[in-house]
Image: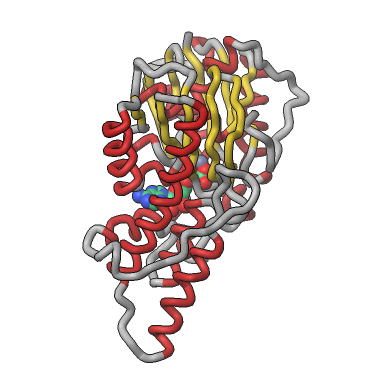
Amino acid sequence: MRILAIESSCDETAASVVENGRNVLSSVIASQVEEHKLYGGVVPEIASRRHAEAIVGVVSSALDEANTQLQDMDAIAVTAMPGLIGALLVGVNFAKGLSLASGKPLVPVHHLRSHIASNYISNPDLQPPFLCLIVSGGHSHIVMVEDYTKMKIIGRTRDDAAGEAFDKAARVMGMPYPGGIHLDKIAEQGDPFAYKFPHPHVTGGKYDFSFSGLKTAVINTVHNIAQKGGEIPVADISASFRKTVVDCLCEKFLAAADELKANKLVIAGGVSANSLLRKQLADECKRLGYGFYMPQKSLCGDNAAMVGSQGYYEYLSGNIADMSLNAAATASIE
Ligand code: KG4
Ligand code: ZN
């Protein structure tokens, strides 16, 4: 079964053709990041306009690169929630148009579910149930994936998402948007024990995260050094910050796995590209005898291949929309 998938939830316009949920025939991504960089973050109005300009070309390229055409598709999957509403609407309306014109079923996909599905592409033998840590620019969740379309939230961030904290820490040290990847690289040169940043304490939800206090601690540290006229030790601060975030994520994720007796652990989302997170969890899972799965780095960020993968399982579970489908800025993964 072949699915044409479309993604436009944030700042990448993407389209892909995926066969049977696991085999990617094409994956095209038009990134707007260079333009948003000028403003230090995504400007929603610009994002919507750029999606509208790019979508026809991106979808045509995805079909061309897969050597196929719309008539040969079995369904059209699209990210419908959550994300920037104006950005999502471009993809949703385009997908509705294609579905109406071709008569192919329209499959709405939840953005975070699609991040999880990037793992089905990178790890062909992976099947639910498993426990997943989803860490992106907008969300940080621990989710029990009971089945491909049945999920339960075990923990979530109370404030900033992990990616957001990375980006804000990177920004205060002068790195370009999105700073997570730059901070990750620079951290490799630094001492992770040079600075002691607070491990956020969260009352209530045992597996909930909080990153805003940590983010503020980094910002204050940088400002204090700058005010005294000192040079910012960017590598050491980056390494110490990265270690603190990764320790927090690993600690809660592994504690949840222990309590839920989950022995298959999966990571997903933009921050799952983080080198320390990947290494630390791989080492811990090896030590504990858990199976550990992660997406290949090229599938950690936003792309449409993961939408085609999740779309396949949504289709099989009967999640098919009609022309009343609307985009939603917020929506639970459950
Ligand atoms: O999943 P994603 O592409 O978009 C959202 O759905 O939000 O995640 C983007 C986030 C950004 O905050 C970006 O800085 C972060 O993922 N990110 C990283 C790394 N690569 C991307 N954070 C830490 N280390 C990385 N290597
Ligand atoms: Zn994403």
Horizontal and vertical percent position of residue 192: 29, 62
- Left or right: 229 as drawn, with respect to 262: left
- Residue 287 at least partly seen: yes
Residue lying at 50% horizontally and 65% vertically, measured from the top left: 215
Residue 100 sits above or below residue 243 on the image:
above
Q: Residue furthest right?
A: 324
Residue 316 sits above or below residue 328 on the image:
above
Residue lying at 74% horizontally and 22% vertically, measured from the top left: 323
Horizontal and vertical percent position of residue 267: 42, 35
- Residue 51 at least partly seen: no
Residue 75 sits above or below residue 206 on the image:
above
- Left or right: 55 as drawn, with respect to 121: right
How many numbered discs? 0
Q: Residue furthest left?
A: 189
Residue lying at 27% horizontally and 38% vertically, measured from the top left: 283
Horizontal and vertical percent position of residue 245: 42, 54
Quarter occupied by residue 311 = top right
Horizontal and vertical percent position of residue 90: 63, 38
Q: Residue 222 versus residue 14: which sits nearer the camera?
A: 222
| Quadrant, the C terminus | top right
Residue lying at 53% horizontally and 37% vertically, measured from the top left: 142
